[in-house]
Image (cartoon, grey):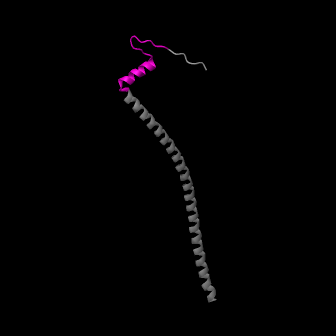
Amino acid sequence: MQAISKTNPMQSHNKGSFRRRRLVMLMLACFLSWAGVTLWNQVDKISERSQKLSAVQQKEAEAQQQNETLQHEIARLNDPEYVEQKIRKELHYVKQGETLFYAPKPAQ
């Protein structure tokens, strides 16, 4: 009988230990599931943000190129010869005594 009474407390101790392990494993599984879902959402957000970043960087490069072109044009507009040449070409101005001839464009 003594052997039977000694095995009973061991079985109840094992049952309690098993329950605690099962509870800890359940909590660990829930935490890992939550962490996995959060990680998946973060990966989607990161890829979306990187696409937006590349689009903005492309727009910045285009704006930088346009800025350089305009800065070059501004520098050229400070030259009186260039201004005169531009006025003659775009506005068809002529100096006194000059005659302006128009050449017909070839028919296509």
Q: Residue at x 39, y 24 (%)?
A: 82
Q: Tell whether position 92 is magenta.
A: yes
Residue 44 drawn in magenta: no
Hey, which residue is sitting farthest top in the picture? Answer: 97
Q: Nearer the viewer, residue 105 or 70?
A: 105
Residue 35 drawn at (x, y percent): 55, 59
81 to 13, vertically: above or below: above
Q: Please state which of residues 85 and 47 is positioned toward the viewer in this rendering.
A: 85
Total numbered circles: 0
Q: Nearer the viewer, residue 89 or 47?
A: 89
Q: Quadrant of residue 27?
A: bottom right
**Eyeballing the image, is 82 above or below 63?**
above
Which residues lie in the magenta part?
77-101
Residue 60 image position (x, y, % from top left): 46, 39
Q: Quadrant of residue 29?
A: bottom right
| Rendered location of residue 51, percent (x, y) | 53, 45
Q: Nearer the viewer, residue 19 or 30?
A: 30
Q: Residue at 51% across / 44% down in the picture?
A: 54
Q: Residue at x 56, y 65 (%)?
A: 28
Q: Against 63, is 34 above or below?
A: below
The relative height of residue 8 versus residue 66 in the rendered view (above or below) is below
